[in-house]
Amino acid sequence: MVAPYVDPPEAEGDRPRDRRRLAVLWRLLPLIRPHRARFALAFAALCGASGMTLLYPWAAREVVDKGMKGTTAQLNTIMLVLLAAFLVNAVLVWLRHYSISWLGERVVADLRILVFDRVLTLPLAWFHERRSGELVGRLASDVTVIEGVVGSELSMALRNSIQMIGAMVMLFVIDVKLTLLMLAIVPPITLTTIYFGRKIRKMTRAVQDELAKVSGQVQESIGAIATVQAFVREAYEAGRYRDGVEGAFARTLAMVRWRSWFFSTAMTAGFIGVAAVIWLGGRALHNKELTGGELTAFFLYTFIVAGALNDVAGLWGALQRAAGATDRLFAVIDTVPEIASPERPRALPPGKGAVRLDGVSFAYPSRHGQPVLTDVDLDVAPGEVVALVGPSGAGKSTILSLLYRFYDVDAGRVLFEGVDVRELALGDLRRSLAMVAQEPVLFSGTIRDNIGYGKSGATTVEIERAARDAHAHDFIAGFPDGYATMIGERGTKLSGGQKQRIALARALIADPRVLILDEATSNLDAESEAAVQAALARLMQGRTTIIVAHRLSTVRDADRIVVIEGARVVEQGRHDELMARRGIYHRLVERQLIADHRAA
């Protein structure tokens, strides 16, 4: 069973957890490594620009001292040097900003691709334990947090670190005693930063969790908008969304209050320290221990250190947020799919679609105590048409999921062309199968795109041939844009019969060994069903076909009907044989006839 990822509870003052979360940021380094040259250029530009910034207080020192004791020519020289430094600094700042921004956007793009690539390989059980809207919301919000840190805050952190270290060195050069006094304010600021940072991190994570839930509600409501409107539940859904937004707003306000106290406290502590330095510096100037230029430079370097400390205080909270977001995203990336191709898969042998279930038992991971299949044996010969019938929940669709290897059996084997499906590459197995479901899933592109989805690199000729064989070409040609017609999300612009025939064409172009029909015509009117049945007759020729149906009238002509009840195969045979036995199949047919008569 794939356990859902949940952030573990945190204890107050959990320092190992803090270190672990920040250490997670190092996992972004492999994404930066391919762009080492770009990073080196950005770092060099950043160092150069930061170094230029450190020249200005020294220039101010020279201006003050030379203004008091030097000549006008010396002042002019200093100003020319400063102007040249400004121009060089402008170039370096542009280069640093562009390179860091490019690097941040590139890393975020690569991270998005990594997460989505992993999500596509995860088993169905993983998705069944999560709401898709919440997953999408989490992906969007967490990546956005990381984008801000990598794209801008990383640059700020490096710049402030360089400027702070450089300014500290210059302060010690000017006056050791004053510098030591100024440094006395650093421990309180550091402790304040750590304390508030932990609080903010927890609150930020709670806000992100709340927003992810709200995103899930939005997707759920919009995805079922017809049902919402049909039951006049617009007000209920709006209220549910409003409650979620208000809850997120309340959590955000709590976080904002803490952040406000954080910034206020850090800045106040910093400026109190600056005031103390100004007072002590004034005394040193009065006692002739410093020149006016040295004191000016000292003040400017102190402001650089104070500003850097203030920015670092804000960056600490940003790093905490990014660490939490990175942790969650890499939890997805690090998830090892339980359903995966073996390291050394067996080659798929040639064949016409032989399927066998050998003593198969299975229960869904979330319901281990409720077996869906128990010791099931079933042989489907190449080219045979087999229908699976039985009451809802009997395990018919589960057999299809096991054949596709969406899940692995708990006991027994599922064999395809005589090979256990767990020994085959997933791509080889699934490319040999094609399913047409009761509710075909179409994508919001063109008709051509949806039919061609069944085969990578399908040509226009192949797509049109598949559409003709699926009895879909005529209605497609009747659209003004033909095969370029946009069908809307999930094919909302098409009728049920049209969607079904496009799904059939998609299955046909895949040229599968085994065709699977899961209630493929149960929702269609008589005219659409007749067209789809004609297309199915073409598609089933020479192929192994497995039909799952509740409407027993659709399986009368199957080569064999397999009745499943109570997680077991209880009857097999042709329609006439099973009716003559007057067993479970006979009872199912009678019940459906009575239901159809009452409905009529």
Image (spheres, rainbow, N blue to C red):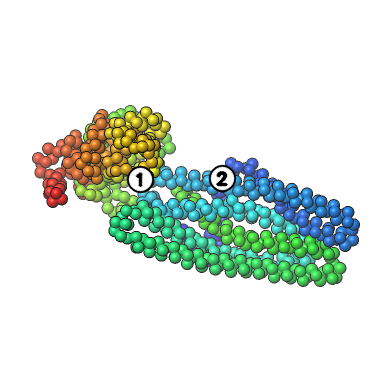
Compared across the picture, whether 71 is left or right of 42 comes to right
Along the line of sight, which residue is nearer the eye, 197 or 356? Answer: 197
Question: Residue visible at 71% across and 56% down?
Answer: 163
Mark 1 neighbour density, 10 Å: few (under 14) some (14–19) many (20 or more)? some
Res. 464 image quadrant: top left
Q: Amino acid at mark 2?
A: Arg
Name the residue beneath numbered marker 2: 106
Name the residue beneath numbered marker 1: 490
x, y percent for residue 533: 23, 36
Q: Secondary structure at mark 2?
A: helix
Along the line of sight, which residue is nearer the eye, 239 or 206? Answer: 239
Question: Residue visible at 46% across and 50% down?
Answer: 332
Establish if 239 lies above or below 366: below
Compared across the picture, whether 276 is left or right of 538 comes to right
Along the line of sight, which residue is nearer the eye, 453 or 349? Answer: 453
Q: Secondary structure at mark 1?
A: helix
Question: Residue visible at 78% across and 66% down?
Answer: 177
Q: Amino acid at mark 1?
A: Arg
Q: Earlier in the sequence, mark 1 or mark 2?
A: 2
Asked whether residue 411 appears in the rendered view, the answer is: no
x, y percent for residue 423: 36, 37
Q: What separation in Å lies between label 1 and label 2 (alpha carbons)?
A: 32 Å
Establish if 422 lies above or below 220: above
Compared across the picture, whether 319 is left or right of 60 comes to left
